[in-house]
Image (tube, coloured by chain):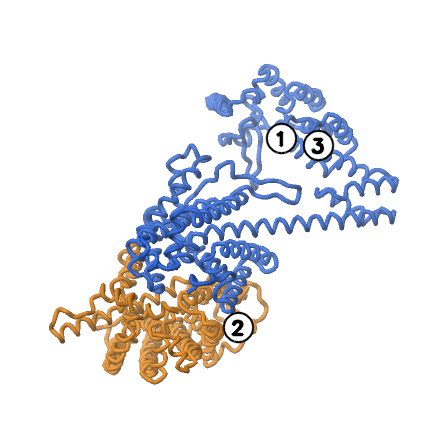
Chain colours: A orange, B blue
Amino acid sequence: MTFMNTLFGQGRNGLQSRQQAGQKTLPFVAILVISTLLACASNLLLTEDSPLYVSTYTITLLGKYLCYAMLALAVDIIWGYCGILSLGHGAFFALGGYAMGMYLMRQIGDRGVYGDPVLPDFMVFLDWKSLPWFWQGMDQFWFAILMAVVIPGLLAFIFGWLAFRSRVTGVYLSIMTQALTYALLLAFFRNEMGFGGNNGLTDFKEILGFDLQADATRVSLFAITAFLLAVIFIISQYLMNSRMGKVILAIRDGESRARFMGYHTERYKVWLFVYSAIIAGIAGALYVPQVGIINPGEFSPINSIEIVIWVAVGGRGTLIGAIIGALIINYAKTRFTALFPEAWLFALGGLFVLVTLYLPKGLMGLWETLQTKLNKAAPEAEIEPKDEIKTGVSS
Amino acid sequence: MKPIITLIYCFLVSLSTGLMANDLANNPTSLNPQTSNELRLALTQVKLKAMPPLLMQIKQLEEQQALPLFKTLLAGRLYYVKADKRLIQMQKKGKERHYFSLETDQPLSELSKNQVKKVKLNNAVRRLLKSTIAELELNHPDPELRQAAIESLLKNLDSKLIAQLEQRRSLETQEKIRELIQVALNLFQLKTNPSPAKQIEAIEKLADRLEIPVKNQLTQVAENSIHPEVKQAAIRALTKIEHATNRYALVDQLFFGLSLGSVLLLASIGLAITFGVMGVINMAHGEMIMLGAYTTYVVQLLMPNHIDYSLWVAIPAAFMVSGLMGVIIERGVIRHLHGRPLETLLATFGISLILQQLVRSVFSPLNRQVFSPSWMTGSLEINPVLSLTLNRLYILAFALIVFFALLTLLRKTSLGLNVRAVSQNRNMAKAMGVKTGWVDAMTFGLGSGIAGIAGVALSQLTNVGPNLGQAYIIDSFMVVVFGGVGNLFGTLVAAFSLGIATKFLEPMTGAVLAAIIVLVFIILFIQKRPKGLFPQKGRAAE
């Protein structure tokens, strides 16, 4: 438990930055909304030869980034604000994605390769005669959305309830979340599970009757994603600024103290974990119709760890930081993997090392340091990255 | 022109292989080249009636060396080239026919269907061949071949064979083979003797044998015998055999469990030091194993002619490579993150990505072929239903050796004393003059080096590729956490119990589900007992 204190020795700074970030909520949401509207408008209203035209491909890509940003937000809430490093959030994301994928799969109807009106192609291929029980009801949109929220939430509740009640913390918890997603990865790879095995779910045709390939559908999906991100961002910001948020920060900085003051720390942790998992599930449900596929690869531990690095780069403990980190790294990834596919893992790996060593508060921390320097116009600002590490150890 | 070239080529090939084998006495042509060759040539020309005496002559002259020829002939695969009357063998692959040299098994791709002719044979010749082959094999100088021959003969015994076997029994010196011959005689007695008393006597003698023909014969008797006592005796014997088989199947499962346990132990033992003793989360641990496996590959590339000794070079080399990498990581990164485990986890994960990509760029993303030395291939056959593969057996022993060597190192050497001191109370150790930085580097190097050694062992069991380490990292953490952090014996117990549990679950649930069940079990177990099977006690625990 001692490392919790040492780990987040910069607790006071964290609180300070949170308040500063809180002031930026409105401008940030405004930027998000305006840029979304502009992108949508330029795609729908302008012609392709216009220099300001945003292609549908770019729109889909942006939509994907926003889903990742939502996922990063989920991880930041649990890691940055409560000090629980989850290496398994990809699992909640994928579960939400699978729920949406199942709905989309049922929407294909008899347009599949085998033309079965009820059974998806892979079940016909496996020679299944009837729909498994967990596929029942998935042809209803509302039910699928409900499942995309309930299943990750339920898993998070069970896992969190077991783990936090028996006070499993820190590294143990991280490794267990990783084992959880790994177990799910193995499970979903099995054909017998009834989720399409290795190939996952794909070949989707339409959502709520709208063609998934149509420009209008894609733009709408993107706009919905942006809207939901803004909503979740505002709610989360509100939560973190509320009394509950203060208790959560207290748990992060000194769980034993918070407990001795009479707070049921494990309850706060469980509900925060569930909240975070639900956000991840929603992100997954939005991700699948835009990308057009969901397969067990989404459960792989490395995906979950990548989310953590988005948050770390952006600056954990600031919701804006998580979103910015996710956007920047994923943009870089798209660029990098196209230009030098070999170098991407080097860059990502190097980023892990450099950020943890030299940028413990991420880009937002850097930004603040620069701001204080500018404001004071004095060179002796105390937040040199190296010093940061040392204070972290001593406190 | 072409046949002549072929002929020369074949001559050269047979000559060279003869030299290579360095065993000219085994070469049938060298026995009595003139007559032997002439006799074989005659095979292609004689009428079917003249075949038996000719075969007898060949047998007299060549003895065991005639076995391949006879077997090929019996299988109807003996052909000869029309042009030079050379004997060859034919093998069917689907509908295609492929021809091979009889002596060297070299493919003769230049021959086509109309250039060759089959050596004909009839039932009389077949019968003769069968008994001749049996006789030759029964009297083969190599006891292992003799045993194998008798085992294969158990399936279709006849009176002629029994006579041969009885003859052989009086000459046989090996106790094991004598017993086997006795089994054949009993089996024959059961099959042919009409007296129920004799049959029961035979059944009782057969009840402790595990050979499959015995079981088949007994099942047949149990179903069809007209004497109820015989039937009963057969059923009794069968249950006895069934029990024995089950017992050995259990031993087999246990062996596979131990083998998986030894792999887990090897993979996690280094982690037990870096994570368990030092408290450093090294997500690049799997890549240390991978580096060890690739070191084995490179060592084998450097000494392609001495594969048998390559592992002895690879073990210290892998220790050095991975250990050095560990020291670099410790000095370069982990040192700066002391006391911040989650950051350490992320940074080392970054290192693992870099190392994976490095291996992909240097070697290739594909799996590399690592050879097994000849002394590690094959298996130890205990009885007809139980055989243990040698490589797994060696790795099991190796894992235990490494484990106990490490234990001794930590308990008996000054380095071990320092390591324990630093892990228990860093500041106090520092105050007593222990160079904690140096001890950290050495400990981390040691843990990583052992991971490298594990890589050498794993290269003998699994594919060597860039993802090798990834496959083991989660399992290793599970083993260490399950066993209790900071407790080496806990790691040993955890590795073997998880290995055995997985292998016993597998037949019931399938491999993947077994892995999932074990994972879920550990997750639940940790919830219940967060400190593992054997938690540390006392001051060191905090």
Provide residue B308's location: percent of width, then percent of height: 46, 35
Q: Is residue B150 above or below residue A217?
A: above
Left or right of B112? Residue B364 is left
| Image marks 3 and 2: residues in contact by CB distance under 8 Å | no
Question: Does the image show residue A41?
Answer: no
> Could you say whether the residue bearing mark 1 is in a helix, strand or loop?
helix
Provide residue B246's location: percent of width, then percent of height: 68, 51
What amino acid is found at the position of numbered circle 1 in the picture?
Thr
Q: Mark 3 points at which residue?
A: B175
Left or right of A388? Residue B262 is right
Measure the C-alpha gap from mark 1 to mark 2: 58 Å
> Could you say whether the residue bearing mark 3 is in a helix, strand or loop?
helix
Q: Name the residue under label 2.
A: A117
* Badge 1: residue crowd in 10 Å (few <14, some 14–19, many ≥20): some
Q: Which chain carries label 2?
A: A
Q: Do pointers 3 and 2 mark residues of a single chain?
A: no
Q: Is residue B56 above or below residue B97?
A: above
* Badge 3: residue crowd in 10 Å (few <14, some 14–19, many ≥20): few
Provide residue B226's location: percent of width, then percent of height: 87, 47
Q: Mark 3 lies on which chain?
A: B
Q: Mark 1 lies on which chain?
A: B
Q: Which of marks 1 and 3 is nearer the N terminus?
A: 1
What amino acid is found at the position of numbered circle 3 in the picture?
Glu
> Could you say whether the residue bearing mark 2 is in a helix, strand or loop?
loop
Question: Which image quarter: residue A85?
Answer: bottom left
What amino acid is found at the position of numbered circle 2 in the picture?
Pro
Left or right of B336? Residue B109 is right
Q: Name the residue under label 1.
A: B72
Q: In this view, does A375 lie above or below B80?
A: below
